[in-house]
Image: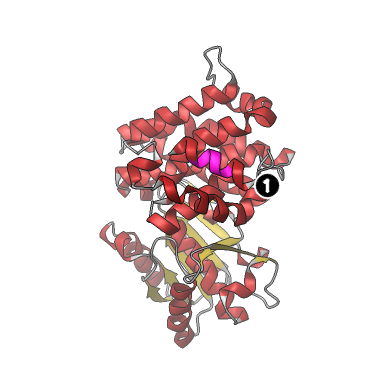
Amino acid sequence: MIFGAGSLSRLGEFVRELGGWRVLLVTDPGLERAGHPQRAQKLMREAGLEVFVFDEVRENPTNKQVEVGVNFARGWAIDIIVAIGGGSSMDCAKGINFLLTNGGKMADYKGFGKATKPMLPSIGIPTTSGTGSEAQSYALITDASSHLKMACGDKKAAFRIAILDPELTVSQPRHVAAVTGIDAIAHAVESYVCTKRTPVSQVYSLEAFRNLEPNLQTALSEPDNLDARSAVQIGSHFAGVAIENAMLGICHSCSNPLTAHYGITHGTAIGMLLPHVIRFNAPVAEHMYADLTASNSLGNGEPASEILAQRITELIAFAGLPNRLRDCGVSESILHILAEEARQQWTANFNPRPVTEEDLLSVYQSAW
């Protein structure tokens, strides 16, 4: 992991270090307005590399989009992949790597360790501070027919190098900075308390929260504050490392059906759900929530779970995001269907408090 303002300038050097000469650059068309893909392309070409740009990534990439990327890449004898953008670009790049090197379809790699052949070296360059995908070996790809997210993981799919340049995050619109930042905080909180937590993962979760909680508000109110941007970016990355070594919980399993049915942005869905998930988990996770609140000296005499839930609600309000499902057009009559689908999401299996469909319905009802 390479971290620091201006570190993108070393991209050509890192591609050469990994033995790359013919680069597939994966990005999204919206990012081109900020000029980041063009700059990455220029840096690599100045290093004598051939670059082929696939810029058809969309939010929450599907298996169909991955297949389009694979068909594009097949004609160019690619030997390395570079992804620049948000989590969608990262995930799509990993998905392309699976199919380009191992064949088949994305569903073949659902789970972990299904790739039997070597995969191409890759470099991840996040321009948002939220998913932490640059630190993870999983690609989250949506099944275009069922709308369910497939987690396809393999150590070979992990980026060999992650370049964290906080200067790239300054171009984020405020709304994008808000929803990705809230998502990163949820990663820190959920990974800290999930059943797969370890002493190592909790070190990263806690450090992620220490960086994210006090600095996200500053980054939103002072978008050119590079210190705050840097803290949020490194916090997001540490949360990604925590997920890689642990897991998440029902906040994420409940958010995915909202995106599938209503197109609600992932971070927006996360923000509406997280305070209610924290309260639901309090009977078994109160002592761990106390670690998080103590790390940033949050406290007013109430239980740690309530302090944490209220702080998340404050950040959501400051960001200008909705805090109720009904405000996003979610019908109360569909909540039981959402609960059924949320139970099928694999992250629900690692929630610190075991859940049933009825429990998930109660969380949705609280958020509604």
Q: Position of residue 88 (x, y in %)?
A: 45, 60
Q: On the rendered structure, is 237 left or right of 266?
A: right
Q: On the rendered structure, is 248 left or right of 125?
A: right
Q: Position of residue 47 (x, y in %)?
A: 42, 70
Judging by the rendered image, the residue that carries numbered circle 1 is 350
- Which SS does the magenta portion mostly show? helix
Q: Residue furthest front?
A: 333
Q: Position of residue 199 (x, y in %)?
A: 73, 38
Q: Nearer the viewer, residue 53 or 220?
A: 220
To which quarter of the image does residue 195 belong? top right
Examine the rendered structure and indicate whether residue 174 appears above or below residue 26.
above
Examine the rendered structure and indicate whether residue 51 appears above or below residue 357.
below
**Total marks placed:** 1
Examine the rendered structure and indicate whether residue 29 appears above or below residue 316.
below
Q: Is residue 156 magenta?
A: no
Q: Nearer the viewer, residue 91 or 272?
A: 272
Packing grade of label 1 (10 A; few <14, some 14-19, many >=20) is many
Give the position of the C terminus as an image quadrant. top left
Q: Nearer the viewer, residue 157 or 256?
A: 256
Any part of residue 350 in sight? yes
To which quarter of the image does residue 152 belong? bottom right
Q: Residue furthest left?
A: 33
Q: Identify residue type, mark 1.
A: Phe
| Magenta stretch bounds | 360-364
Q: Position of residue 218 (x, y in %)?
A: 37, 31
Instruction: Please tell me which residue is depicted at 36% across the width and 65% down the height of the picture.
Output: 28
Instruction: Please tell me which residue is depicted at 48% across the width and 64% down the height of the picture.
Output: 147
Instruction: Please tell me which residue is depicted at 66% across the width and 76% down the height of the picture.
Output: 118
Secondary element under disc 1, as helix, strand or loop, is helix
Q: On the rendered structure, is 189 left or right of 221?
A: right
Q: Is residue 361 magenta?
A: yes
